[in-house]
Structures are given as C-alpha cells and as structure tokens.
Amino acid sequence: MRLHLIRHPKPQIEAGRCYGRLDVPAMGIEAVAAALRAELPAGVPVFTSPLRRCHDLAALLHASPTADERLAEMHFGEWEGRPWDEIPRAELDAWAADVAGYAPPGGESPRALQRRALDFVASLAVEEAVIVTHAGVIRTLLAHWQGLPPERWTELNFAYGSCTRVTVPR
C-alpha cells in the first residue's frame, strides 16, 4: 500500500507551548494545499486527523476527506497548552527516560499513539491513500516500519506542510 503522509501546516500558537490535542488552526493552508495538489495523485482517498490544522488542509485537497480520531496528535494531558518551560522538570525527565512508554499526567504515551496509528493503517482497504496528520503520528508509524528503537524516534523530523511517501506491506 502506498501512503502519502502529510504533516499539517504551521499552527497558529505561540512558540514554546505544548500542543497536541489543542484544536488550533494553521497558517498558510491555501498555499500548502496548492503545492501539495501539484504533487499528489488524483482520485486518491484522503484521510485526516479531526483537528482543524489537519482537517482544514484535507478539505482543500479532497471534497470529502474522512476524519479519524486515530490520526489525532498525541494527547499531552495536563501539559496541553502550557509553556514547555512550566512543565515540571521531573515529568520531562521521566519522559526522556522512557520515550515510548511515558504518558504525561492525564495523557497518552507515544507507544499508545503508535498503536492507534498502526490500527488505522491496518484498517485501510485501499491500495493508495493521502493521510493528513501530525508529526507524532508520522514519526511513530515510520519508526515502526523502519524498526527504530524508541531512543531513535526523535531523529525523525518532518517539516510543516511536507509530504512523506512510503510503501508498506499489506
């Protein structure tokens, strides 16, 4: 199966603030959509995170994109919307010590995010799809397919509005 994994455009949120499930809009969506339309195959179904920064872009790429909660960004729980420098150091250190397994208070772990993203991909009944989602989703999917250990997951970075193409076995 061929997947076109698109990271949403830059969100309209102050720098240095934790946002995962915060539903913030994105900037420059029309320009990103125009650039992507020129490189994406026609007639391919589009799936999207329900969060605005993804869904608004997906709606410009396809008349009726399919939203799926499993494509939402990691839930940072009590960290959501807080400046990173106000999150207790002990909590950040615990996350650094267990990159895949640690869940912020009231949130989910990257491993849980990976499980739901892989579940979404396994549920696809198409040979090719466009998926508009978040860096965390793309990172955990590619880490799985590349067999990367959790301590290397942060090496995978994706620019806002970028498209990563991958072929995965069915």
Image (tube, rainbow, N blue to C red):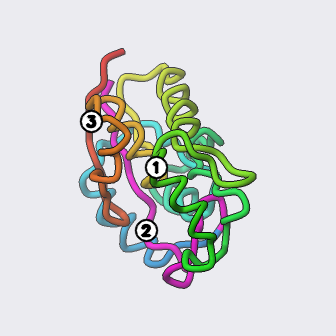
| Marks 3 and 2, the one that precedes in the sequence | 2
Residue type at mark 1 is: Ala
Residue beneath disc 2: 9
Give the residue displayed 34% in from the left and 44% down from the top.
Answer: 151
Residue 54 lies within the magenta run = no
Picture coordinates of residue 91, whole percent (x, y): 60, 60
Q: Which mark is residue 166?
A: 3
Residue 9 is covered by the magenta coloring: yes
Q: Nearer the viewer, residue 82 or 4?
A: 82
Q: In the rendered image, which quarter is residue 108 located in?
A: top right
Which quadrant would the C terminus be assigned to in this image? top left
Alpha carbons under labels 3 and 2: distance apart: 20 Å
Badge 1: how crowded within 10 Å, few (<14), some, or many (20+)?
Answer: few
Q: Is residue 120 above or below residue 89?
A: above
Q: Amino acid at mark 3?
A: Val
Q: CA distance from mark 3 to mark 1?
A: 30 Å
Question: Which is closer to the viewer, label 3 or label 1?
Answer: 1
- Disc 1 is placed on an element classified as helix
Q: Residue at x 73, y 62 (%)?
A: 78
